[in-house]
Image (cartoon, coloured by chain):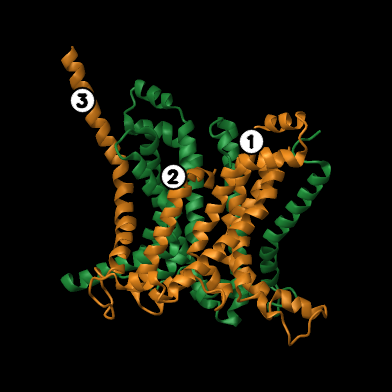
């Protein structure tokens, strides 16, 4: 006898699960369907077309916004992963005073509302510019650099959380063995620890990248005259004629991000199974 | 011998300390410059110590705080509205996720992680696009209404208008967005449950329902509380979803902050609201933090 659920309850749970999956995926599927419809975004469907995709991919403003998002996401995720590795190392392998405070600080961006963080960076940059204008007659302004700075802060906790479990499993004795064989601290890190950490670094990078690529709230305050893809998308929603194009690009972005996320997860498991490290940290 | 050993130890220790400083320096500098200092700026702005815009009063005072906390402005009632919406969303999300977590953790044997990934995957895709999808679906001429007209269930000139731009829509869409996220902590808490406890309970004659109420539910409570906090905290400051699908009736506290900074240009009041929100979240985390292991976010 199954103690968790009767066969009757199991059937209902299965139905509920299926309904929830349908609820989660239906809007995404509908989005994709209407991106290939030749008429309005309403029933009845009129006919199949790839026109919207063609228009979207030849729209310079749209492509510019996508490119900016790629740039921001690349920079911010690389920096976040680099800082994340350092912090994960310090938190796991080092003893130092104030460790709980450092850890709290590093994780607190997880719970700070993005609207608050966005406006606080807006205030910082505006104050800095006011100061620079008054003293040196120059200013930095808002733009992609500001967004990168903000995205690094919010991606950092995710990077640390992705790297830590694997680092925890890498035995310190491996490091010690390398040192006994004559490697100094840096080459131990580069030749032993880093290669073994690669799966975690890749997933940390992908998580940070997708987070940044999609992030609207912080970017909306800091973009200035350089809208990233989410900021551009948001602004264009007011123009009904643009909607089908936006849906087309949205569908591409959704499919690509789903594919990336799933393949990263599968890849991480394959590596974990082969090396035996991190096998039980998958999800 | 002893002296030499001591010297080497000392040298080793200072080397260690240098290495630790090297590890911490970069990240701490970044977080201080771009996270701590900006937040302090908000606090300073809220009491008029910092003023940047020409229309700022330019004098240090707690007047804006007093006005806000006394309820002289609409913002305090707007805050409570946000609290209500967030509580409703968190409740619905936990209610939807619990059966899924239970199903996957306790009744599925094969491929449970694949099925779990199926639930979580949408969360890892674009947040904005998933909200946008609902705007497209629920509009007056949107997918649902045009479908109803098409099949003749509804006259063309009388769409169901409350589908979009209402508080209902904000709750629906926020719940939709956050379900994948909290399925994980609930699943983890149920999956770590010692199954022999359930068997013992059953051996002692308890029904499945009684076992659930007396054993499973209490033991999974930390996961449930964590899930609740995981939804409540990010939705309390939410402004993107209300902006897209909320209309005027779905206007929330986060929208007020956004508008004060981008439209109204009353940064001082905006800073009061922002810092107040931050304080509320800080208190919540101090109270409930022990339930929330940050690690269960990514697993």
Label 1 marks which chain's residue? B
Location of residue A127 in the rendering, given as x and y in whole percent from the top left corner:
26, 69
In this view, A25 is above or below B206: below
| Occupied quadrant, residue B34 | bottom left
Q: Which residue is mark 3?
A: B10
Please rate how many residues cluster around mark 2, counting C-alpha atoms within 10 Å: few if below 14, some from 14 to 19, many from 20: many
Do callouts 2 and 3 point to residues on the same chain? Answer: no
Which chain has been coloured orange in this picture?
A: B
Counting residues from the N terminus, which is met first, the one under dot 3 or under dot 1?
3
Number of the label disc, if any, that sits on residue B193 = 1
Q: Image point 25% across, 67% down: which residue?
A: A128
Please rate how many residues cluster around mark 3, counting C-alpha atoms within 10 Å: few if below 14, some from 14 to 19, many from 20: few
Location of residue B186 in the rendering, given as x and y in whole percent from the top left corner:
61, 46
Side of B98 relative to A172 (left or right) = right
Q: Image point 46% across, 39% down: which residue?
A: A164
Q: CA distance from mark 2 to mark 3?
A: 31 Å
Label 2 marks which chain's residue? A
Q: Is residue A143 visible?
A: no
Task: Give the residue at the far top of this rendering.
Answer: B1
């Amino acid at each position: 006898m199954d103690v968790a659920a009767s066969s009757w309850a199991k059937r209902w749970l299965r139905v509920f699960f299926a309904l929830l999956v349908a609820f989660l995926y239906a809007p995404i599927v509908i989005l994709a369907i209407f991106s290939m419809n030749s008429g309005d975004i309403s029933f009845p469907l009129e006919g199949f077309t790839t026109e919207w995709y063609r228009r979207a991919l030849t729209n310079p403003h749209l492509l510019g916004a996508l490119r900016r998002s790629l740039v921001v996401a690349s920079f911010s995720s690389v920096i976040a992963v680099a800082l994340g590795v350092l912090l994960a190392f310090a938190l796991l392998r080092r003893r130092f005073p104030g460790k709980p405070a450092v850890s709290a600080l590093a994780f607190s961006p997880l719970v700070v509302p993005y609207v608050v963080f966005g406006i606080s960076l807006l205030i910082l940059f505006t104050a800095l510019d006011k100061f620079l204008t008054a003293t040196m007659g120059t200013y930095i302004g808002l733009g992609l650099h500001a967004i990168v700075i903000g995205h690094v802060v919010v991606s950092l906790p995710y990077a640390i959380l992705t790297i830590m479990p694997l680092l925890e499993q890498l035995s310190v004795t491996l490091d010690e063995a390398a040192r006994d064989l004559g490697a100094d601290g840096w080459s131990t890190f580069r030749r032993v620890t880093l290669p073994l950490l690669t799966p975690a670094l890749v997933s940390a990078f992908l998580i940070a990248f997708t987070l940044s690529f999609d992030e609207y709230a912080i970017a909306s305050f800091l973009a200035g005259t350089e809208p990233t893809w989410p900021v551009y998308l948001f602004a264009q929603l007011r123009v009904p004629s643009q909607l089908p194009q936006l849906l087309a690009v949205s569908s591409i972005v959704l499919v690509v991000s789903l594919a990336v996320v799933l393949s990263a997860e599968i890849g991480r498991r394959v590596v974990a199974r082969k090396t035996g490290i991190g096998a039980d940290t998958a999800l | 011998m002893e002296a030499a050993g001591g010297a080497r130890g000392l040298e080793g220790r200072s080397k260690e300390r240098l290495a630790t400083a090297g590890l911490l320096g970069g990240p701490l500098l970044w977080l201080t410059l771009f996270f701590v200092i900006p937040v302090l700026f908000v606090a300073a702005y809220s009491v008029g110590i910092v003023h940047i815009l020409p229309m700022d009063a330019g004098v240090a005072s707690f007047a804006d705080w007093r006005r806000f906390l006394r309820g002289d402005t609409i913002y305090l009632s707007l805050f409570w509205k946000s609290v209500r919406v967030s509580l409703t969303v968190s409740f619905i999300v936990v209610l939807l996720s619990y059966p899924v977590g239970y199903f996957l953790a306790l009744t599925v044997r094969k491929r449970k992680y694949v099925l779990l990934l199926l639930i979580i995957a949408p969360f890892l895709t674009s947040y904005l696009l998933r909200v946008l999808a609902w705007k497209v679906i629920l509009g007056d001429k949107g997918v649902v209404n045009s479908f109803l007209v098409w099949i003749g269930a509804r006259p063309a000139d009388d769409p169901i208008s409350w589908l979009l731009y209402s508080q209902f829509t904000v709750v629906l869409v926020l719940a939709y967005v956050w379900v994948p996220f909290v399925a994980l902590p609930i699943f983890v808490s149920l999956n770590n449950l010692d199954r022999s406890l359930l068997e013992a309970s059953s051996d002692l004659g308890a029904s499945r329902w009684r076992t659930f109420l007396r054993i499973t539910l209490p033991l999974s409570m930390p996961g449930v509380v964590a899930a609740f906090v995981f939804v409540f905290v990010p939705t309390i400051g939410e402004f993107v979803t209300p902006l897209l699908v909320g209309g005027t009736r779905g206007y929330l506290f986060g929208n007020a902050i956004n508008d004060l900074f981008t439209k109204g240009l009353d940064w001082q009041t905006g800073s009061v609201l922002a810092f107040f929100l931050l304080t509320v979240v800080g208190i919540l985390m101090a109270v409930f933090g022990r339930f929330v292991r940050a690690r269960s976010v990514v697993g």
